[in-house]
Amino acid sequence: MKNRVNRVVFVLCAGMLAATVFTGCSTTKVSYGDAADVETTTASFGSTDLQQIASKMVESLLSYPSIVEVTRQRRPVIFIDGIKNKTTEHIDTESITDTIATRLMRSGKFRFIDITKIESVRKQIEFQRESGMVNPNTAIQTGRQIGAEYMLYGNLSSIVKKSGRTKDVYYKFTLKLMHLKSGIIEWSDEKEIRKTRTRSLFGL
């Protein structure tokens, strides 16, 4: 009985040692790739889709006749209300609007207000006014903020179809620019993306 227990312990220890040696000998390779390369890992929403959407929306907005006329005279102030994710996937739509906003700002045609930071701004203004720690001559006064002229908002939706080994995913991204004073939609465009994934016969 004792010999059997010893053999079991020996086998277990040998197995653990082998696993440790195998793990220690394995290597993991990490390399950088081009962020602009086409991503085809899965049929889910990915970086290439985000870049295509941002490029299409920015190019369309900057070339729209009425917007071109406005931006010749001044740099309108915009705030982003957000993108509604109507797909069944967990998609960070804020990344899409961040990319669009960054490219529009770099064009030199627009200015943006970040409404997600309004509460932080309010607290900072209160601190400067009421704490007694800030020189009154340099403290920011309330009522001096510049109001936005336009609101940018939109939707991301998808239709997913499966048949046998094939999965078809259709995305539609819609973006709109509203003139806040009049409520008129000054510009709108959409980007459609279709992706198809076909599994191998062995399900790989």
Image (tube, rainbow, N blue to C red):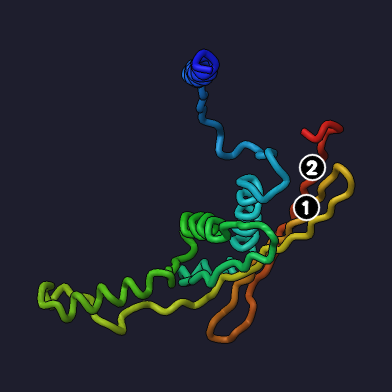
Q: Residue at x 53, y 75 (%)?
A: 150
**Position of residue 30 in the picture relative to residue 58 (left or right):** left
Residues at discs 1 and 2 in contact (Cβ within 8 Å): yes
Q: Nearer the viewer, residue 82 or 181?
A: 82
Question: In the figure, 53 relative to 86: above or below?
Answer: above
Relative image position of residue 152 (x, y in whole percent): 56, 70
| Quadrant location, the C terminus | top right
- For label 1, the crowd category at 10 Å Cα-Cα, with few meaning under 14, some 14 to 19 and many 20 or more, is some
Instruction: Please tell me which residue lies in front, 69 or 123.
Output: 123
Question: Could you give the CA–CA distance between mark 1 and mark 2, rounded to whole angstroms?
Answer: 8 Å
Badge 2 density bin: few <14, some 14–19, many ≥20, Cα 10 Å = some
The residue at which mark 2 appears reads as 197
Q: Using the image, tell me which numbered label, if any, was put on residue 169.
A: 1
| In this picture, residue 109 sits left or right of residue 170 | left
The residue shown at (53%, 85%) is: 181
Q: Position of residue 14 (x, y in %)?
A: 51, 15
Q: Mark 2 is on which residue type?
A: Arg
The image quarter containing residue 192 is: bottom right
The percent coordinates of residue 85 (x first, y second) are: 64, 65
- Quadrant of the rendered image containing residue 67: bottom right
Q: Nearer the viewer, residue 160 or 125?
A: 160
> SS for tag 1?
strand
Residue 80 visible in the snapshot? yes
N-terminal of the pair, mark 1 or mark 2, is 1
Residue at 59% of width from left, 77% of height from top?
A: 178
Which amino acid, mark 1? Val
SS for callout 2: strand
In which quadrant of the rendered view does residue 189 lie? bottom right
Residue drawn at 50 percent across, 27 percent down = 30
Q: Where is residue 102 shown, x and y percent of the image?
A: 48, 56
Residue with the most extreme bottom position:
182
| Of the pair 40 and 147, the residue shown nearer to us | 40
